[in-house]
Image: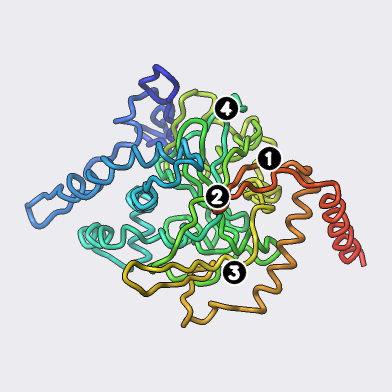
Amino acid sequence: MLPGQTRYWRLDLNPDVVWKQKKRNDLHEWSPKKVFAQDDLYTTRWGNLIITDIERFFFGKLDNIAPEAVTFFSNFNFESCEENYFDDFITYMSVQKLRTPKGLAAFAALAKSYNRNATLILLQELRRLYCATWTECVWQIAEATNSPTKFIISDHPVTVYNRACPPLSKYCRFGGDPDIRLNATHTYFPLSLDKVLILTNLSWVRNPYQSELNVRPNPKYLRDTMFNMTAIQTGRMLTEDEVLLINSITKRRAHRYIAAAEKEWLYPEKRASTDHWKKFGAGWLLMPEPRFVTMGGQIVVGFNGGGGASFSEYGHRPWQKGYKDKDREKKEWKTLERFQAEWAMKFGPKYVANNTDLGRSRLQEDSDEMTEEYREIVRKHRTKREA
């Protein structure tokens, strides 16, 4: 909320009908405790016995450690990489996607669980369901600092966008969200009024010319993987229209309610440049700076006392199919180079974000020679399309 603010503006996207087609008021100014409240959402029942242990002990513990982890990423800088909030944060984010009314319905469908009590108990066991997929994404923390409009939140705060999966699409199964493992699926999570974390599948950044609905390499949900925190992109300043477009997606993906610090922010579609679902992503709205993305990415680690482990950029282990895929790598070399060139021609030689990889400063602006090389790549692909 804004400094000194104690209430949100909350909009009900589907207000109840109370009498002869008359609906309840859709707009309220309420405290945070009432904005997205739903009674007994996590309560289990065994006969006449009502148990709230899941809410008190499981969610309660996560909610106690989450604020510090969220603040860490909201204020993320490369000097603070040695602090270890990643595990708390990614687990909390996974649970935030799972424990909403929309998330629980999706989780029950995914787990084929038809018993509410069993679903809640299973949720505790699979609380890290999305963590491996998100860990292997390209991370960027974008800012609305220069925009008068700030980020809104919804009753399903971890928002998913795939430009080929509008709401009610047949691909939006499990409660209305597309699978996060589809190539073109972005996941984003507002960290504060001014900051949003955007996660994009590496396979989509390397090749945004493939089908949006193909599944990324190594789609298995529950497995070990590695994360390079120094590769997080920061400093991208979103325009007013980009913030409005992101808020439009949040509104369209909400279960029933959205909330904002300012009343007019609840209606982004009134001022956004488009309300067409596919066009939100057609202009690379949620894409990271591709000139920081490289090929390769294998991670090798050694353990105290001997031994080690290695992971491909998509989380494969050495004995798994796909650990080294020369055909995929050859194709991604070409498509990533093309994407970097087209991005450079659209946004110019100065990079839209910052990044430090393994402690080395990275190039923040293309040279004239690099710009000309990118221009030639774009020219070649344009000639091929026209031919």
Front position in the image: 8 or 67: 67
Label of residue 238 in the image? none
The amino acid beneath tag 1 is Thr
Q: Is residue 187 left or right of residue 367?
A: left
The amino acid on which the numbered mark 4 sits, given as a three-letter code, is: Thr
Q: Which amino acid does label 2 sit on?
A: Gly
Dividing the picture into quadrants, the one containing residue 68 is top left
Is the C-beta separation of discs 1 and 3 under 8 Å?
no
Q: How far apart are marks 1 and 3 (CA)?
A: 26 Å
Viewer-closest of 28 and 84: 84
Badge 1 vs badge 4, beta-carbon distance below 8 Å: no
Neighbor class of circle 3 (other Cα within 10 Å; few <14, some 14-19, many 20+) is few
Q: Distance between the residues labelled 4 and 3?
A: 34 Å
Q: Residue at x 76, y 43 (%)?
A: 347
Q: Is residue 130 above or below residue 72?
A: below
The residue beneath circle 3 is 214
Task: Check disc 2 and report the residue beneath it.
Answer: 359
The image shows residue 218 at horizontal and vertical percentages of 50, 72
Left or right: residue 241 versus residue 12 is right
| Amino acid carrying mark 3 in the image | Asn
* Disc 2 from disc 4: Cα separation: 34 Å
Which quadrant would residue 349 be assigned to in this image? top right
Please state which of residues 46 and 91 is positioned toward the viewer in this rendering.
91
Q: Check if mark 2's residue and mark 4's residue have beta carbons within 8 Å.
A: no
The tag earlier along the polypeptide, 3 or 2, is: 3
The residues tagged by marks 1 and 2 sit, at their Cα atoms, a distance apart of 40 Å
**Numbered label attached to residue 274:** 1
Q: Is residue 260 left or right of residue 267?
A: left
- Residue drawn 43% across and 34% down? 12
Q: Which of marks 3 and 2 is in front?
A: 2
Q: Label 3, label 2: how many angstroms apart (C-alpha)?
A: 34 Å
Per the image, label 4 sits on a secondary structure element best described as loop
